[in-house]
Image: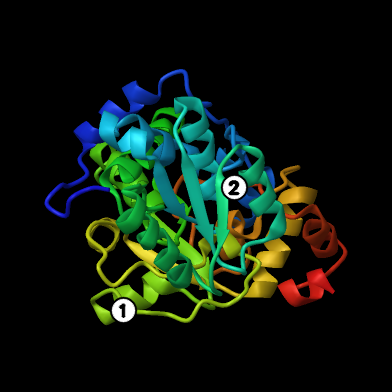
């Protein structure tokens, strides 16, 4: 949607905040006594999984839809999603009264597919990866003149996600470490941009799953690279970052201070911890920050905020994890 010459700025984030006023929730920031005791420093949880559609994606999706020119609205929008972006786009499109098509791979959990369909979007299941689903989305752009709204590599989307960063620094003015789930980079790029504009010395840490960590492997290679997509408890963090990535890769490289990977069993334990100790139901992709602290893979230096970015988990999988499953295959058995 955005031209490569455009850049996300703090001004754009502030404009997004004005545009989104009254259209989404200001989500709570709550202390975690257990994680604070474990790390020896105050730890708070940003409950973004309480957002209207169950994840942060509503911010970027709504800002992107509201930024569309009239001709683009008339032709409709298309998105590629592992679930949460599609849900946010479907909600935003329904509110704006425009056509929305969401292309997904066969790896997307059925509960997320049906939630998007319930919001009025058209569903296209294509291939076994995000990259293969994107082929169908690009066909719709070429043949039907629809506008593609990227889940992460788009200035309007990144700016919308950045409103979360503004909320965090306003709610936790003394925050020194900010731990954010890492996938295509739209969330952490926007959050880091906004938060560091207010707190330049803020340490931002991105956490993702060990298998299929596309952004981390791209950072290590110094350029966007293809990474095989595999099934994971952190399904919302799956997918590539695009070899033609124009925005999020550069921003993550410049703004994120550290990254970490967590194993499937560590994600499972974090989902259990969130429920039993924090009284929160979160999906695997949202639990990776907690997982990194529990496993000692990220150090909480000074007051720390952990972003819980989504709660759209299959409740059968959630129950299986609570009962001791440590991998997606076990949870679905």
Label 1 or label 2, whichever comes before in sequence order: 1
Q: In this view, does 317 lie to the left or right of 22?
A: right
In the depicted structure, whether residue 280 falls above or below residue 138: above
Q: Which numbered tag is attached to residue 137?
A: none
- Residue at horizontal 54 percent and vertical 67 percent from the top: 126
Asked where in the image residue 53 lies, by quadrant, the reply is top right
- Residue denoted by label 1: 220
View extreme (right): residue? 323
Q: Position of residue 329 (x, y in %)?
A: 75, 76
- Residue denoted by label 2: 310
Cα distance, mark 1 to mark 2?
A: 27 Å
**Dots 1, 2 in contact, CB < 8 A:** no
User: Can residue 93 be seen at all in this image of the molecule?
Assistant: yes
View extreme (left): residue? 5
Mark 1 burial class by Cα count in 10 Å: few <14, some 14-19, many 20+: few
Asked where in the image residue 54 lies, by quadrant, the reply is top right
Q: Is residue 66 left or right of residue 87?
A: left
């Amino acid at each position: 949607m955005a031209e490569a010459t455009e850049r996300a700025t703090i001004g754009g984030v502030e404009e997004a905040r004005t545009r989104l006023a009254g259209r989404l929730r200001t989500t709570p920031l709550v202390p975690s006594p257990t994680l604070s005791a474990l790390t020896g420093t105050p730890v708070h949880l940003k409950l973004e999984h309480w957002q209207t559609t169950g994840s942060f994606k509503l911010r970027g999706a709504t800002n992107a839809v509201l930024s569309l020119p009239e001709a683009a609205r008339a032709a409709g929008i298309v998105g590629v999603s592992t679930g949460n972006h599609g849900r946010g786009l479907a909600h935003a499109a329904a509110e704006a009264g425009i056509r929305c098509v969401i292309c997904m791979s066969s790896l997307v959990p059925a509960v997320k597919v049906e939630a998007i369909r319930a919001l009025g979007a058209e569903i296209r299941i294509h291939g076994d990866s995000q990259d293969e689903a994107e082929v169908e989305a690009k066909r719709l752009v070429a043949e039907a003149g629809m506008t593609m709204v990227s889940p992460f590599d788009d200035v309007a989307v990144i700016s919308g996600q950045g409103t979360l960063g503004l909320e965090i620094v306003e709610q936790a003015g003394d925050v020194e470490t900010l731990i954010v789930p890492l996938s295509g980079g739209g969330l952490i790029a926007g959050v880091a941009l906004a938060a560091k504009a207010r707190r330049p010395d803020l340490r931002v840490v991105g956490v993702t799953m060990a298998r299929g960590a596309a952004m981390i492997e791209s950072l290590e290679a110094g350029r966007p690279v293809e990474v095989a997509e595999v099934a994971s408890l952190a399904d919302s963090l799956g997918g590539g970052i695009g070899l033609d990535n124009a925005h999020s890769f550069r921003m993550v490289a410049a703004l994120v201070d550290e990254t970490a990977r967590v194993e499937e069993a560590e994600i499972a334990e974090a989902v259990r911890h969130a429920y039993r100790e924090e009284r929160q139901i979160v999906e695997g992709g949202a639990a990776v920050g907690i997982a990194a602290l529990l496993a000692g893979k990220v150090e909480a230096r000074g007051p720390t905020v952990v972003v819980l970015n989504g709660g759209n988990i299959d409740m059968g999988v959630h129950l299986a994890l609570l009962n001791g499953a440590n991998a997606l295959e076990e949870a679905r058995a």
